[in-house]
Image: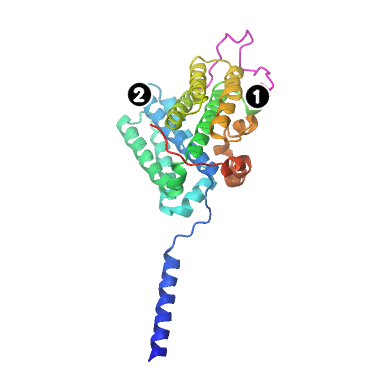
Amino acid sequence: MNNHFRFVLIGLMLLVAFNLNTNKPIFAHTFSGDESASFLSAVEMIKIDSQLAAEEIASNVSIAKDHAEHTTEHITANDTKEINERNPRLATELNSTLTDFVKTFESESPSESEVNDKVSNISDVLSEVVSARIDQKQLDNVTVKALVVNDLVGEGLQHYGSALGMEESEHEENEEHESASNETENGSNETANILNEADYQGAQAAISRAIDMYNEIKPSENANSTELGTSITSLKDAIDSKTQFDEIDKIVDDKITPLLNNIFELNLSEEEQHGEEGAHAEEGEDHAEEEEESHSSSENKTHEAETEG
């Protein structure tokens, strides 16, 4: 009797253990802080482009359509794969929601109310995706948020260069203080010539969002925190004033990147800062590996703190 009872008990324990194991979600990847920041930056850019599309639909359908098309450029195949690991339904829903949003603008006169409804739907889906894709610990992490600020500054710089008709190689030339072909040659007081209004609006919006996010994490005890806030605001003002690209680039290299490093210990170099430009559209399957290489030091220094605002 005792032996029989012992065998039954062991069998029940094995059955429970098996069920617990098979019901547990299997995640193939644990995301680092820098990977989470890159994904959150992509989410912010999708929100920005969808909102700009809605804002422009009444005045310029062509620009609105450009913004709508840009919403599909921020999430890579690797991002979709990672979302699918967590929640296959959301991966499919995000793709179909963005595709449907773009198709709305195939009409010559898209409905404003329909576009606004779809923008709201995109925001709802993205909220679900973020909750499924990124742990709350990462969402609350100050270093992750600082990396998002850094990425949004990079997005603003990239979009501004694209608005001027610059290629990536011309960005590099400006690092050496050479003039890009689309800029005026009459000195720094001349305004730059905007060739792509959608990219220009994207640059303005990315920096505005960077300002908002920085204000959420701005440390009161750091002497450089006010200077960083002023520098990001100066960057926004310079873009609004259509300042030449090399001056915009100088604000980032000489002020914003060093101050971000100093305050949040991100260990970013100028090259890494600019290396983030356009990364969400090009990284593909190599995204995770590249991110780990570019921000490996910052991952080790990731710290948690309560945010202000």
Question: 10 and 55: which one is in front?
Answer: 10
* Percent position of residue 243, x then y: 55, 15
The amino acid type of the residue labelled 2 equals: Ala
| Placement of the N terminus among the 4 image quadrants | bottom left
Residue ID at (41%, 46%): 131
Instruction: Give the number of the disc on residue 58.
Output: 2
Q: Is residue 183 magenta?
A: yes
* Percent position of residue 147, x then y: 52, 36
* Percent position of residue 249, x then y: 59, 22
Q: In the image, is 251 to the left or to the right of 133?
A: right
Question: 145 and 70: which one is in front?
Answer: 145
Judging from the image, the colouring scheme is rainbow
The amino acid type of the residue labelled 1 equals: Glu
Write down the region rendered in magenta.
171-196
Q: Nearer the viewer, mark 2 or mark 1?
A: 1
Q: Quadrant of residue 193?
A: top right
- 74 lies above or below 208: below
Q: Which residue is mark 1?
A: 170
Q: In the image, is 115 to the left or to the right of 256?
A: left
Question: 252 and 172: which one is in front?
Answer: 252
Residue ID at (51%, 38%): 143
Instruction: Give the number of the disc on residue 97.
Output: none
Toward the front, the furthest residue is: 221
Crowding near the residue tagged with mark 1, few <14, some 14–19, many ≥20 C-alpha atoms within 10 Å: some
Cα distance in 3D space between marks 2 and 1: 34 Å
Judge whether residue 123 can be spotted in this image.
yes
